[in-house]
Amino acid sequence: MSKVFVLLLFSPFCLLAQSSFITPMEYASSLYQNPRGIGCHKCHGEFGEGKIVAKYEHKKEQKSFVGSRINNMDFNNFYRALNVRKNGMPRYFLTPKEIQSLYFYLQEKKKEEDANVK
């Protein structure tokens, strides 16, 4: 994928074509909160930072089920992860545009997070 194509693909202007009554960030945020009945934030945190979903005991050993950090993934791995059922991750059957929007959302939130740390 060329760099120009990637920039156009993830630009807010490209996402505006999806809906003209809300901003690309509003659309992406609502999708992140509830893509198909259960939001990404439930397992991956408010901004894709990852979080503990549940703690449990197995064979007298304390364990945790953890939703992984997803805001640091490259697009190809992110896209693949959303199209394969693995380790408790459900298949949402998202469209390519929905996946692009989710990736856009996470990248924007990561920029905010990085700016607040400095």
Image: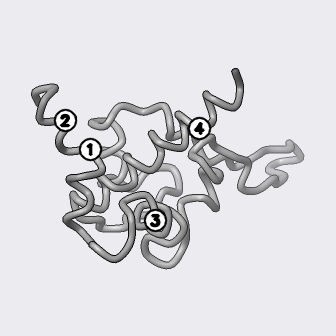
At x 13%, y 30%, the residue is 4
> Which residue lies most toward the right here?
60
Circle 1 crowding by C-alpha within 10 Å: few under 14, some 14–19, many from 20: some
- The picture places residue 110, in percent across and down from the top left corner, at 54, 36
Going from the N terminus, do you reach mark 2 or mark 4 first?
2
Q: Of discs 2 and 4, which sits in the foreground?
A: 4
Assess whether mark 2 and mark 3 are in contact (beta carbons under 8 angstroms): no
Q: In 3D space, how far apart are the residues under numbered discs 3 and 2 (Cα atoms)?
A: 21 Å
- The amino acid marked with disc number 3 is Glu
Badge 2 vs badge 4, beta-carbon distance below 8 Å: no
Given the image, on which type of amino acid does mark 4 rest? Answer: Glu
Q: Which residue is label 3 attached to?
A: 26
- Residue designated by label 4: 112
Cα gap from disc 1 to disc 4, whole angstroms:
17 Å
Residue 64 place in picture, x, y as percent: 76, 46
Q: Which residue is mark 2?
A: 6
Q: Residue at x 42, y 33 (%)?
A: 73
Mark drawn on residue 1:
none
Mark 3 and mark 4 lie on one chain; the one further toward the N terminus is: 3
**First in sequence: mark 1 vs mark 4:** 1
The answer to whether 55 appears left or right of 67 in the picture is right
The local crowd at label 4, few if under 14, some if 14 to 19, many if 20 or more residues have their Cα within 10 Å, is: few
Q: Whole-percent x and y of residue 61?
A: 86, 42
Tag 1 residue: 10
Q: Which is more toward the observer, 82 or 74?
A: 74
Circle 2 SS class: helix
Q: Bin the neighbour count of mark 2 within 10 Å (Cα to Cα): few under 14, some 14-19, many 20 and up.
A: few
